[in-house]
Amino acid sequence: MKLHLMALDVTLRNCGIALGTYDLDTERLNITQIRTLKTKRENRKVVRANSDDLRCARELLSHLRQTAKTCNVIAAEIPFGSKSAAAAKHFGITMGILASLSLDLPLIEILPLEAKKSTGNENASKVGVIEWAYRRFPDLSWKINKKTQKPTLNSEHMADAIAVMHAAIETQQFKQMIAMRRALQEIAF
C-alpha cells in the first residue's frame, strides 16, 4: 500500500511543490514530480495591491486544492516571523492557505530548521539544499544551467519541498499515521 504525499514550500509568489509516494511495505519514499507555482503581481495601476494579493492567493489555493485531490497527506514548511509589513501580510496569506488545505487532509507542519536537518546539514545554504535534492533525485524536472549543468537558484523552492517531505516522514505524526494505516489494513483482511 502506498501513501500519496504533497510537500510544500509556500510563499505567495513562489510555491515549491513536491509530489511523491511512501510505500508502507518497503518504507521507501519516491518523489515523482516537482514544480514551482509562480504568481505574478499585476502591474496595472487600476488594481489595488491588496486586491492583487487576494487574486494571487486564490490562484495558489485553487491549484493546490486541485493537486491535493490525489494525495493522502500534506507536509508544509511553516513560516515564522517577518521583517516587514509586506512579509507579515504574505505570512498571513500563507498561513490561511495552509489552514484551508488542512481542512481536507492531514497537515504535517515542518519548521525550516527541520527541513534543513533532513538534508544532513542543519546549516545548509539554499545552494546546499538544491545540491542535496538534485543528488538524490537527478531525474526530476530541475531548471538546469546550461553552462554548469547544475540546477539554477530558481530550483530553490522545489528543493525545499523535497527537504520538507523528507523531514515529514521522520515525524512522530507521520509514524502514527503509518501505524494507523497498517492496523486498518490488517483489520480489512
Image: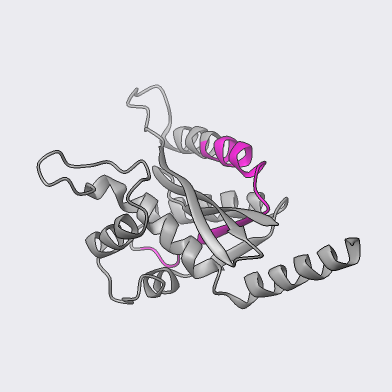
Residue name at image x 76 percent, y 65 percent:
181
Is 34 or 39 nearer to us in this picture? Answer: 34
Residue name at image x 48 percent, y 52 percent:
31
In the depicted structure, whether residue 99 falls above or below residue 114:
above
Residue name at image x 46 percent, y 62 percent:
164
Tell me residue 172's x, y (percent).
Answer: 62, 78
Q: Is residue 107 left or right of residue 17?
A: right
Tell me residue 90's x, y (percent).
Answer: 44, 51
Is 168 or 23 nearer to us in this picture? Answer: 23
Q: Is residue 109 left or right of residue 46?
A: right
| Residue 145 visible in rendering | yes
| Residue 78 visible in rendering | no
In the depicted structure, whether residue 111 falls above or below residue 91:
below
Image quarter of residue 108: bottom right
Give the quarter of the figure containing the N terminus: bottom right
- Colour setup of the view: one colour
Asked if residue 29 is among those painted magenta in the image, a careful observer would answer no
Asked if residue 73 is among those painted magenta in the image, a careful observer would answer yes
**Magenta residues?**
60-82
Give the quarter of the figure containing the C terminus: bottom right
Tell me residue 125's x, y (percent).
Answer: 25, 66
